[in-house]
Amino acid sequence: MDKIIIEGGRRLSGSIPVSGAKNAALTLLPCALLTDEPLTLRNLPRLADIDGFQHLMNQFGVSTTIAGSRPEDFGRVMTLEAPRITSSVAPYELVRKMRASILVLGPMLARMGEATVSLPGGCAIGNRPIDLHLKALEALGAEIEMAAGYVRAHAPDGGLPGGRYSFPVVSVGATENALMAAVLATGRSSLHNAAREPEIVDLCNMLVAMGAQIEGIGTSDLTIHGVPRLHGATYRVMSDRIEAGSYACAAAITGGEVTLEGAKFEEMEATVQALRDAGVSVEAVAKGIHVAAEGPLKAITLSTAPYPGFATDMQAQLMALLCLAEGSSVLTETIFENRYMHVPELNRMGAHIETKGRTAVVHGVKHLTGAEVMATDLRASMSLVIAGLAAQGETQVHRLYHLDRGYERLEEKLALVGARVERVGGD
Ligand code: UD1
């Protein structure tokens, strides 16, 4: 299995192109199920999760073609076409590997009037149920039954009528599923306490480009007027705010400065504020966002929260940065109950972090030391890379497949700004 070897202590400087957003792409791809016309997605990141989703779409009979991208380019253009859907079953084998597969449930139900999707099962960052996905779809008129580890959803004859649902907890995935189901309903739907992450806005914008009628985009109250059919579209995936935030932490921890090309300041305000509070300069510039470490890092207190709050997907990377801050930072994880797998590994690198339940106290230390480390999820793995960039000596990050799920050509991008990183085959 591949690993990444980092020689720490080099100041990062230069520009990093930000890729298309993984989490946006994973909800834009299943929208191809909503139309029999071609859907072309530009700026699609080259990631293992995207390949996995493509495979899932192929299994439903959706054709996928990749055009016009040279190997040296970041991103790809993919055209998906589903004139005829040949299967409405998402099997365990695929859903187990990639939880986002659950996002075919809404669009498949809308287009075919039925969908059978394996329950995703457990996941390293906690118990991630899908009850809200199912309740929202039921509120839109679906009939749902569970059998042998699968969810079977049916629409009444004539299609989903649409309906009203108020989410008891903000859920990105459940909002996406409900939106994709509601756009082809026969009537009107309203979703309350909906997630309003920029990736949801991206989804709404693309659905509108396909002919959907959605009001309240960018707010937590969405009204969807169902239309009989959607047409094809060409759409550019938004830039990845989590990838950009990760590289901002990487630059800052090395005392460096980078321009994150294509990053959108207005979609990253909570991350920007956290970095500024920690003593890092962050400014919007014509090309994207400029980040520069200025003086010593400062301790901060922060909780994760749904957008526009501080993203849980940035918690691990920010924690790595705070390991070298002056004073003690307090981070509280409110979204997932088990998202501190990076803590013991950071501590093995010389960090001083204590966790109690959902709170982590990060006592700043003077320096980190390279070590062999591994993590069990994507963002935790990135936090170890960030720590490794600042650590004295060599860090080896194992289980690289996590990083390949969410960071397009990580080592190439880090090398662009002067990091010494190498991918090697390991065990
Ligand atoms: C998405 C992101 C993930 C991010 C998360 C929160 C994708 C592919 N993944 O995940 O990277 O960390 O948003 O920003 O976009 N919940 C329930 N029942 C449900 C669904 C969720 O109780 O049916 C709970 C979850 O356990 C969690 C909270 O709601 O505590 C938020 O989860 P949710 O927003 O749904 O996360 P995902 O969509 O899975």
Image (cartoon, grey):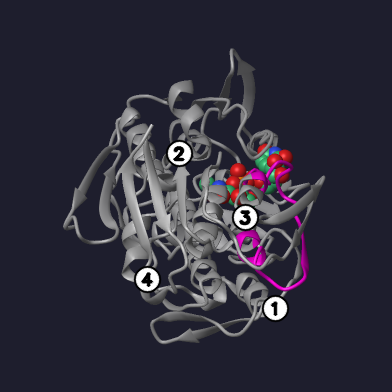
Residue found 51% across the figure and 33% down from its top: 158
325 magenta-colored: yes
Q: Where is residue 364 in the image (x, y as percent from the top left)?
A: 71, 66
User: Circle 1 is placed at which residue position?
Assistant: 277
Residue type pointed to by label 3 = Ala
Cα–Cα gap, marks 4 and 2: 24 Å
Marks 3 and 4 close (CB-CB < 8 Å): no
Neighbour class for label 3 at 10 Å: few (<14), some, many (≥20)? many
Neighbour class for label 4 at 10 Å: few (<14), some, many (≥20)? many
Q: Where is residue 273 in the image (x, y as percent from the top left)?
A: 66, 76
Q: In this view of the protein, can residue 174 be seen by the observer?
A: no
User: Circle 2 is placed at which residue position?
Assistant: 399
Task: Indicate which disc, 3 or 1, sits on the residue closer to the N terminus.
Answer: 1
Q: Residue 316 carries which label?
A: 3
Give the residues drawn in magenta, as a range.
319-344
Residue found 66% across the figure and 50% down from its top: 347
Cα–Cα gap, marks 3 and 4: 20 Å
User: Circle 4 is placed at which residue position?
Assistant: 16
Residue type pointed to by label 1 = Asp
Q: Is mark 1 on a helix, strand or loop?
A: helix
Task: Indicate which disc, 4 or 2, sits on the residue closer to the N terminus.
Answer: 4
